[in-house]
Image: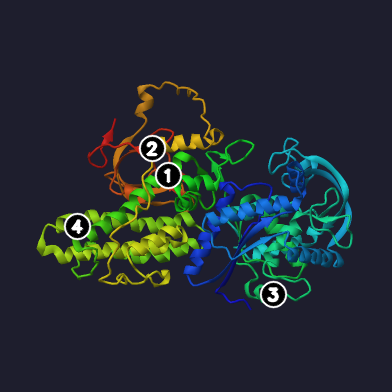
Amino acid sequence: MKDPKDFYMTTAITYTSGKPHIGNTYEIVLSDAIARNKRQQGYNVRFQTGTDEHGQKIENKAKEAGIDPKQYVDQVSGEVRRIWDLMDTSYDKFIRTTDPYHEKQVQKAFKKLYDKGDIYLGKYEGKYCTACESFWTETQLVDGKCPDCGGPVQDASEPAYFFKLSKYQDRLMKYYNDHPDFIKPESRKKEMVNNFLKPGLQDLCVSRTSFTWSIPVDFDPKHVVYVWIDALLNYITGLGYDVDGNSDPLYDKFWPADVHIIGKDIVRFHTIYWPIILMALDLPLPKQVFGHPWLLMGDSKMSKHLGNVIYADDLVNMFGVDAVRYYLLHEIPYDNDGSITWDLIVERINSDLANILGNLVNRTIAMCNQYFGGVVEDRGVVEPVDQELKDIALAMPAKMNAYMNEYKTAKALDEVFTLLRRTNKYIDDTEPWKLAKDETKRDRLATVLYNLIEAIRFSAVALEAFMPSTSKKILDMINTDERDLMKLDHFGAYHSGNKVTDRPEVLFKRLDPKKVAKQVEALNPKKAEPKKEKKAKPSKPEISIEDFDKLELVVGEIIHCEKHPDADRLLVEQIDIGDEKRQVVSGIAKFYKPEELVGKKVVLVKNLKPAKLRGVESQGMILCSSSKKDLKIIDPGNLPNGSKVS
């Protein structure tokens, strides 16, 4: 029986039609963060990725390039692996579907399913999308085009083998009901049930005769195995699974998979086709499939056709590996598509990495060197302000791990940065530069600097899953071997008397947006973000003073603020408006952190009809001013709560 501490996870295998862009690269970085965190939690992780290398599209690409298909996929697979390595990902196995062992097992599995009667010979007639390698009926097309990619389809008619998906439909539905966490997020599960299972499954075409670049059906060589049986089996052949029962011990140790990390566009194949294939082969099903959202370029899906593609190596050359990893892991929500633009990257690096993280580490090490020759010593002079810092540090690992166990990397990172922000505030609260002027406060100064270094150690250990190189640099600079995440249960493990480096490295430099814009333009004019023509917005209709008088505007003070439980872009504020307290939900999480708003004065529309936003009631609206790139809450000054605004 599989050991609960043996954790097997996979990415989807990357299709070798061309170089992966940053949207494709997001998946391997996300998966790597999960794998690293699981290892930190004490799991024995097997992390597999790889490339999908067969199909008509690749055969056509190779012809266009004037080379053999195998030569073509060798080049692209090598490029994929180069980028995965560039992004500092820690996969254990890189499988290729052209690996001889994999191809042999696909042939044997196909034959077994045929012998069972689950695969039968028929004839395919319908529409075919080469780009997606998908068959469609006329009624499934959208405006006569592929419903997945919007590309053209061709009439197709050829003999083909079919797999009896319909035979297993009821069994699959029962599995969904018995295993409610099988598909995550929940929205993906609803899509599969409503769009595919309830209307009824059609049998799946699993062979082709119109091209040759795939695995031959060994008992009928006119046919080659069509994409999904070939591609999906990688998850078990990569463990040494053998159809005849002579599997490698790795298979028994790690299967079933704990999670398949995939893009939301291929959830259907992994939660319908894949489990049914496994059922037909009498094999256990994976425990979970997580369909992550997309990374958009601005508001559009990344596409070479649209000319809005960004590549990982271009980003790394400009910003560094860990800055790119941070952006990907922090800016893409759990359930909704994320966005990337050059401006947003610069903004995030400057605000989070340079200001909050880098500046904290550098000025703390500088003070240790300035005041104590680099020696960090806990002299036990404790004051009440220390306890809040310690409490936040001690609570952070469990909160972070809880989010990581749900694959919510953005929220997990927020927990680390909550500690970093509080550590920065601790400097402001304790004012070490003032303590340094008073010789009687020298022991207190030493204790303050010790607390700062220990809080930084907590943060750096936690950051290993997200920014491994930066984590190591920080821990090396503060000279500590205490790097075990599971031992962050005691504030004070940093060895008193250690000496920090006397030459701290600047972790992240502030970026000049104008200089970055010039670099982007020089990189390739076509890769620069297209400038949209400004269109004058129509003015709203004029109103009378009577219309304006209908608004009841009052001054309030935010006394508590937290993130919305189900929407990353929303904040939930508790606002004191004098005679009562109101709960308001605002779409301002992109511009403000919850802790930044506590104590802030606002102008509230008091008589706005209450509404529920993603399940949470909102009893008013905060007034803000905004541009395309920024948003500011209207500041009413220091007027008392409840004051009328007119």
Taking the image as shown, residue 76 lies to the left or right of residue 527, namely: right
Residue type at tag 1: Lys
> What residue is disc 3 on?
248
CB under 8 Å between callouts 2 and 1? yes
Label 1: which secondary element: loop
* Vertical relation: 374 (above or below) 538: below
Give the residue pinned by disc 4: 432
Q: Amino acid at mark 3?
A: Asp
In the picture of the structure, the residue carrying the numbered disc 2 is 631
Cα separation between marks 4 and 2: 34 Å
Q: Secondary structure at mark 3?
A: loop
What residue sits 36% from the left and 44% below the top? 510
| Residue 300 visible in this rendered orientation of the protein | yes
Q: Amino acid at mark 4?
A: Pro
**Numbered badge on residue 590:** 1
Q: CA distance from mark 4 to mark 1?
A: 33 Å
Q: Secondary structure at mark 4?
A: helix
On screen, residue 202 versus residue 45, left or right, reads: right
When asked about the image quadrant of residue 511, the answer is top left
Task: Give residue 483's position: percent from left, percent from top.
Answer: 39, 69
Closer to the camera: disc 4 or disc 2?
Answer: 4
- Kindly report the distance in space between the C-alpha atoms of the residues bearing marks 3 and 1: 48 Å
Report the quarter where the C terminus lies: top left
Task: Report crowding for label 4: few under 14, some 14 to 19, many 20 or more residues within 10 A (C-alpha).
Answer: many
Question: Is residue 414 shown above or below 143?
Answer: below
Query: For the point 47% across and 68% down, which residue is it?
Result: 40
Name the residue nearer the viewer: 253 or 248. 248
Is 85 situated above or below 311?
below
Q: Closer to the N terminus: mark 4 or mark 2?
A: 4
Upstream in sequence: badge 2 or badge 1: 1
- Contact check, label 4 and label 1, Cβ < 8 Å: no
Regarding residue 198, the answer to whether it shows in the image is no
